[in-house]
Structures are given as C-alpha cells and as structure tokens.
C-alpha cells in the first residue's frame, strides 16, 4: 500500500470514528428522552452503521427517496434507535427530532416503520421479513437495470426465523449480487444469549453453504469492518454477500458493556448523563469539544 | 342390478363445471397475459404452483417477467412486497390455504401495513378440492377480513375473473382474490351489461319471494337455484357480491330494504364463521334492518375428503341443496 493510500485510510478511519461516536451520542440522547430503549444494540452496531452510511451507501440526505439510492433495510425494528442515530448523523433527519423520540406523534417511534420516518425503507419488527423483502427489491432493481444495491441489517436472533432462510436460499438461487446482508451477532435475544436460545453457530458456514460470499469480522473494529465492506462491495463473484459482525452490546460505555446483558440493557435515570460522559472519556473527547 | 357409479375423490384441482356447462380454460392466466401486454410493470410470481394457479400461461408468454420463488410462501409474499416497492405490480399465486394460514404475517406486515400494490391470487378457495383440510381453505376470508387495507375478491366465474384482472391492475393497493382455475364455468355473460367492479355488488336477477346475496362460485349456484325455483313459480333475486371487503353496504341495504318481507339467504363457498354471511348480518344489525336471515355456507368443521359433488351435497352448497334450504325456509 502506498503512503498516500495509508494516509488516506487513516483519514477515513478517523472520520468514521467520529461518525461512530456521534451515532452513539445521538442514541444515548434518545434513550435519555424515553428513559429506556435498545441503546445496548445501538451502541453495539454504531461502528457498522458508521461504515454503512459514511463509506458504503450511496444516498442523498436531502432526498431519501432518490431512485438511484442504495436501499438500507432495517428488519430488526427494535434497532430503530440505532438507525435514527445514523440518519440524524447523515442529515436525513433533523437532530431536533431527538427530543421527541418515542413520544406521541413523533416521526421516531420506538419500533421502525416506513410510514413514519424518512430514510426508514421498510416496516420492521416482525422479525424475518427484511431479507425476503430485500430479495424482491433486488430482483426489482435488476429488472430496472439499476445499479443500486440492497443492504439488509438483521440480527443473530433473526436467524431463528425460518423465513430468513427461505430468503437466504433464494438470494443465492437468483444470484443477487446486488444484495448485501449484515448480521449483527451480539449473542443476545429476548430470553437469553442467542447461543443458548437456539444455537446457530457456525453461522458463517451456514451462509457459505447456502451459496453466499461470507465475511465475519469484529463489528466493533472499524478497520476490520471497513475492509470487509470494501472487499464485499468490490467482489465480482456474482453471489450475494453477507458480512457477519460480532458486536458487543453497550460498546463505548464501559459500565454498560459490563452490565448483565438482556434484550434491554437497564439504564437508571441518573446514569444517562454518566453514560454520555463515559462515552466522551472512551473517545478522549473533552467536554465542549463535540 | 346395476352398480351405482362410484364417484372418485377428485384430482387436486377438480373442475366445478357441470356437464354441458360452457367453460373457459385458465381465464386468469390469459387475462393476465392480455393485461401485461398493456402494462410492463406487471410481473408474475409463484411458490411452486404456477401450473396449478394458471400462471403458467403468463410464464409462457413472458418468461422474463415470471419469478419462480420455490415452495416458500413467506418468501413469496416478502418478495412480492419488495417488487411492489420497486414500482412493479406483482401478481403472486399460491393456494388459498397457504396464503391465509402460512403467509399471514408476511401479507399483513410486509404488504398490507404499507399498502403495497401486490395482487395475491390464490387457488382452491373454500371447498374446491376433495383433498381434505390440508387443501380446503374454508376459513381464508375469516382470516383475512380483519386485515386492514386488504381488498378481498371472490369472483363467480370466468367472466368475473377475466374482468377482475384488469380491475386489479387499475386499482392501487393490496388485493386477495379467490381464484377458480382450470376449466372455469362461464355464467355471467348471460346478464347483459354485467361488469365486474371492485367494491360493487351487482343485482343479477330480481325477485320478490327471496333474496340470495352470494359471492364466488355460490353465485353460480344461486343463479341455478333461482332458475329452478322459477320453474316452480317462485321468484328469487340474486345479488352478486364479488367484493367481500370492503363490502358494498349501500347496495346491500338498498336491496334488502326494497322488499323487507323477503327472507335473505347469504350463500358463500366458505365457513359460516367470519365470511360474507357474518359481514352482511352485522351490517343489517348495525343498520337496524330486521329480516329473516339464513346462511348457506360450510359448517364450522374440518371437512371430509372425497369427490366434490358428494361434498357439495354433504355440506349444503350444491344447487340441489341450495334449492332445498330456500324452499324449507322461504315459502
């Protein structure tokens, strides 16, 4: 790699790190508004969203329905807080909306729905829908000879749903090289650790066996995530691509990283400001620098 | 001694046509090909039932617009939603049992909640196969009636089906259509000026002694029953209600009120629970219209396997049984 390329990559990583910090911060602020929310997932997936929205995706923040955009489908509706944070950071949604998160008539409901929020492509929440919708959209894009791509963020828990695997098989059958799945493996679902509820390991082998080009990375290692995205998007294998990202719920706020994990990470009322402060500490950001 | 001819359990797809009845082969498939010639947004998708839903006609005409999704009804509905999101008009086909029982969540959330332009065309509605409960969609309308945004169509014959295809293309929103396939009887072309319209009930026959409100193939039975009773000096009206949801409340109320002494029979190829009969009953109750009211429909049971004519007699939806029910109650 040339020096220039190295420097440029360092710049990219630095910029993405800032984006990931901002996404985490937006999510914590939304969590504080409601006093609850899936902030653990949002903190865990922030690095992946930073790479998605500020490196990989082709979007126009002023025109979320731009025909030539890449489509990012959030099938895990409860991760809406994470996607809102990314959409705010991308300028699709105004930062002012944070104050109304989850409130009556807010454009940011607790579970993501297409009709409510600019940039929210589908209604998620009934798990196991996103990838199949993505298959249909990817087929539709090919019919239109569009170069746009479909990204679908799903979770390890969502792999329990049989419908997900109908879609996995189909994407490979139709050679949907315009479809990129991102699986957040945080090993946590509603009742327990995913590996205990219904063990799907070895996850990567399963996708590979279904005919996908498979990547597995530490989803909180920006450099690794960036490389996986770059490789996946540059691939000319003709296969659909999946990037499996192992993430840590609560990442970036040490006391939340260490807290007993459940579907919801419990955050007490007085802890939100502490969490924001700890996030700043982790990122080495001085108060007033943001 | 002559042995009675043994009726066999019909093939999966039994024709509901009577002997000597004029029929049209695969009216849905041919009508879709015609519509697709005028609208390049139309695509066809199926879950391994192209041949059994008459979609193979479309597949032959437009192979590049035909998507075989495999035996995966959940995927079929999700992918249909995705296609509609990209601006296409997908006609997705399967059997009524699989659409309603297996794919409900996917139709509800991926399609109906977002009001996407997906046309779900499903074969074997109600009791149109002798294969038993695995294939008899006796409660599909009951399942779907509670789903917001979804229009439910129950065409009577080949004429209805042919006209409903273009009507669905012209209509923006999700539709569930109960398809008759194969050799489908043609009965409605005897009614001059008849047009299928989404959301409209149509009076086919007027009569003062009884009123049958019917949908789907039971409109064909209602017409036959009315004809038969006419020979016995009774005049029985038939109101064909091919759109089950949204119900054409105004036409139904007007027709019932026009002769308030007429007993009302609602005839449907569906369970008496949750279908057209209960829709009409609740309408009349809410509007304070008191009439003698009877349901002609399938019992709230898992039905037997067997030959369709046997089963239609057994469960009271053959013409003979419809006539009997009306005679016993109306006159």
Image (spheres, coloured by chain):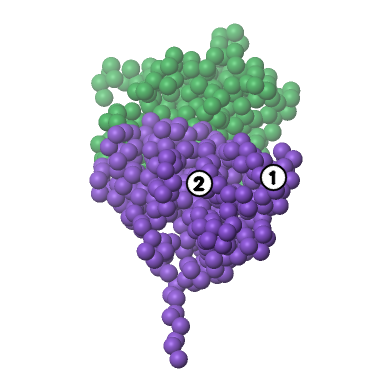
Chain colours: A green, B purple
Q: Quadrant of the C terminus of chain B?
A: bottom right
Q: Residue at x 41, y 29 (%)?
A: A71
Left or right for B37, reference A13? left
Asked whether residue B292 appears in the rendered view, the answer is yes
Circle count? 2
In this view of the protein, which residue sits in the foreground, A95 or B119? B119
Q: Chain of mark 1?
A: B
Residue B246 position within the rendered picture, expressed as x and y whole percent measured from the top left: 57, 38
Q: Is residue A73 visible?
A: no
Disc 1 is placed on an element classified as loop
| CA separation in Å, label 1 and label 2 | 19 Å
Q: Nearer the viewer, residue A185 or B1?
A: B1
Q: Report which residue position mark 2 lands on.
A: B204
Task: Give me the residue at 67% from left, 52% from top.
Answer: B263
The circle on residue B260 is 1
> B225 or B308, which is in the foreground?
B225
- Give residue A228's quadrant in the image: top left
Q: Is residue B137 above or below residue B5?
A: above
């Amino acid at each position: 790699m040339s020096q220039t390329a190295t420097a440029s990559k360092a710049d990219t990583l630095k910029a993405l790190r800032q984006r990931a910090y901002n996404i985490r911060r937006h999510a914590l602020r939304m969590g504080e508004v409601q006093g609850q929310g899936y902030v653990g997932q949002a903190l865990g997936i922030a690095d992946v969203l930073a790479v998605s929205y500020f490196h990989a995706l082709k979007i126009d923040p002023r025109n979320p329905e731009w025909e030539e955009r890449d489509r990012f489908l959030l099938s895990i509706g409860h991760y809406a807080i994470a996607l809102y944070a990314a959409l705010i950071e991308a300028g699709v949604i105004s930062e002012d909306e944070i104050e109304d998160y989850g409130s009556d008539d807010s454009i940011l409901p607790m579970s993501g729905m297409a009709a409510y929020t600019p940039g929210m492509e589908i209604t998620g929440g009934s798990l196991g829908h996103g990838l199949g919708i993505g298959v249909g959209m990817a087929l539709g894009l090919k019919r239109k000879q569009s170069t746009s791509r479909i990204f679908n963020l799903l979770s390890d828990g969502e792999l329990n749903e049989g419908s997900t695997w109908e879609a996995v098989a189909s994407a490979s059958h139709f050679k949907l090289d315009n479809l990129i799945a991102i699986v957040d493996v945080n090993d946590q679902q509603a009742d327990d650790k995913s590996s205990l509820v219904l063990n799907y390991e070895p996850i990567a082998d399963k996708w590979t066996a279904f005919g996908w080009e498979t990547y597995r990375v530490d989803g909180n290692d920006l450099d690794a995530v960036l490389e996986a995205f770059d490789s996946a998007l540059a691939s000319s294998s003709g296969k659909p691509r999946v990037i499996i990202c192992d993430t840590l719920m609560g990442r970036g706020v040490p006391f939340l990283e260490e807290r007993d994990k459940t579907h919801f990470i419990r955050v007490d009322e007085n802890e939100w400001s502490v969490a924001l402060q700890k996030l700043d500490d982790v990122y080495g950001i001085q108060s007033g620098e943001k | 001694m002559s042995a009675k001819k043994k009726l066999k359990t019909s093939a999966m797809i039994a024709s509901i046509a009577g002997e000597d009845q004029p029929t049209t082969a695969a009216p849905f498939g041919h009508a879709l090909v015609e519509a697709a010639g005028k609208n390049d947004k139309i695509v066809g998708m199926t879950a391994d039932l192209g041949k059994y839903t008459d979609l193979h006609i479309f597949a032959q005409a437009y192979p590049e617009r035909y998507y075989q999704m495999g035996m995966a009804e959940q995927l079929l509905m999700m992918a249909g939603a995705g296609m509609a999101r990209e601006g296409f008009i997908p006609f997705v086909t399967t059997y009524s049992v699989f659409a309603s029982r297996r794919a409900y969540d996917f139709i509800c959330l991926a399609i109906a909640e977002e009001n996407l332009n997906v046309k779900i065309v499903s074969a074997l509605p109600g009791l149109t196969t002798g294969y038993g409960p695995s294939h008899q969609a006796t409660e599909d309308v009951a399942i779907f009636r509670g789903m917001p945004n979804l229009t439910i169509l129950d065409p009577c014959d080949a004429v209805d089906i042919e006209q409903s295809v273009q009507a669905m293309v012209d209509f923006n929103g999700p539709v569930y259509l109960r398809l008759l396939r194969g050799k489908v009887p043609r009965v409605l072309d005897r009614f001059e000026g008849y047009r299928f319209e989404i959301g409209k009930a149509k009076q086919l026959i007027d009569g003062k002694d009884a009123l049958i409100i019917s949908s789907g193939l039971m409109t064909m039975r209602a017409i036959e029953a009315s004809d038969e009773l006419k020979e016995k000096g009774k005049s029985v009206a038939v109101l064909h209600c091919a759109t089950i949801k949204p119900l054409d409340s105004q036409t139904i109320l007007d027709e019932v009120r026009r002769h308030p002494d007429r007993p009302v029979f609602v005839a449907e190829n569906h369970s008496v629970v949750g279908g057209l009969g209960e829709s009409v009953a609740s309408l009349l109750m809410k509007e304070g219209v008191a009439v003698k009211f009877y349901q002609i429909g399938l019992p709230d049971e898992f039905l037997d396997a067997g030959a369709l004519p046997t089963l239609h007699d057994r469960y009271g939806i053959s013409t003979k049984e419809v006539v009997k029910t009306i005679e016993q109650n109306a006159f």
